[in-house]
């Protein structure tokens, strides 16, 4: 078998993307949550297929996912972008799941999405809230989530430090 010009680095990246794809596909696309037409209109939920998430991430400088680099999805839904970021941190940079999750943040306005995203990632900094209105509270939001939204988006004086 000939790789016709592909370097070992190219093959290594291809294998990493395959592992990331497998990780993302362990979860049924838009699974576990009933999304009727009313909910979609009310929340503007749009879920991005795995292949499109990977294609988007492949266009980024992979070092943006390096250890210590924060990844945040301000409308994380079921975690489709975050699971890919987790996979890149683990498979390309060799981070443990626990260490990678310390760099990953997600926010969503729907309780079921937040809970599904946390289950899917195996933890992480995933909270219910609204990044456009971080002081807004929701009935199903926990006191800890209210505090974290304030800490992350209202009291944060140096956002550049947060997003390192």
Image (spheres, grey):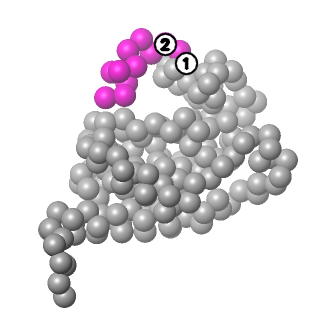
Q: Say which element carries label 1.
A: helix
Q: Does the magenta segment cover residue 163?
A: yes
On the image, the x and y values in percent for residue 13 come to 26, 62
Q: Does 82 sit above or below residue 141?
A: below
Within-10-Å neighbours for mark 2: few <14, some 14–19, many 20+ = few
Q: Indicate the quadrant where residue 70 lies.
A: top left
Residue at the spot of label 1: 150
Tag of residue 18: none
Task: Answer left or right for 61 relative to 2.
Answer: right
Residue shown at the point (60%, 63%) measured from the top left: 29
Q: Are marks 1 and 2 in contact (CB under 8 Å)?
A: yes
- Start and end of the magenta stretch? 154-164
On the image, the x and y values in percent for residue 87 come to 37, 56
Residue 34 showing in the rendered view: yes
In this view, the residue in front, 162 or 61, is 61
Residue shown at the point (85%, 47%) measured from the top left: 38
Q: Does the magenta segment cover residue 149?
A: no
Task: Answer left or right for 16 relative to 5.
Answer: right
Within-10-Å neighbours for mark 1: few <14, some 14–19, many 20+ = some
Residue 116 showing in the rendered view: no
Residue at the spot of label 2: 155
Q: Say which element carries label 2.
A: loop
Question: What distance separates the C-alpha of mark 1 from that of mark 2?
Answer: 6 Å
Outermost residue toward the right in this view? 38
Residue shown at the point (43%, 52%) measured from the top left: 56
Outermost residue toward the bottom in this view? 1
In this view, the residue in front, 106 or 21, is 21
On the image, the x and y values in percent for residue 55 come to 43, 57
On the image, the x and y values in percent for residue 1 come to 19, 88
Mark sitting earlier along the chain (1/2): 1
Q: Quadrant of the C terminus?
A: top left
């Amino acid at each position: 078998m000939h790789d016709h010009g592909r370097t070992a680095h190219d093959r290594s990246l291809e294998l990493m993307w395959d592992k990331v794809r497998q990780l993302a596909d362990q979860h049924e696309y838009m699974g576990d949550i009933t999304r009727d037409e009313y909910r979609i209109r009310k929340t503007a939920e749009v879920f991005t297929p795995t292949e499109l998430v990977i294609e988007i991430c492949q266009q980024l400088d992979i070092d943006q996912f390096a250890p210590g680099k924060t990844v945040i999805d301000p409308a994380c839904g079921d975690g489709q972008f975050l699971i890919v970021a987790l996979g890149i941190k683990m498979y390309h940079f060799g981070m443990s799941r626990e260490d990678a999750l310390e760099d990953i943040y997600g926010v969503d306005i729907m309780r079921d999405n937040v809970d599904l995203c946390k289950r899917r990632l195996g933890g992480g900094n995933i909270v219910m809230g609204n990044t456009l209105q971080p002081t807004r509270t929701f009935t199903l939001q926990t006191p800890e989530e209210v505090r974290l939204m304030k800490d992350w988006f209202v009291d944060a004086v140096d956002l550049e430090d947060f997003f390192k």
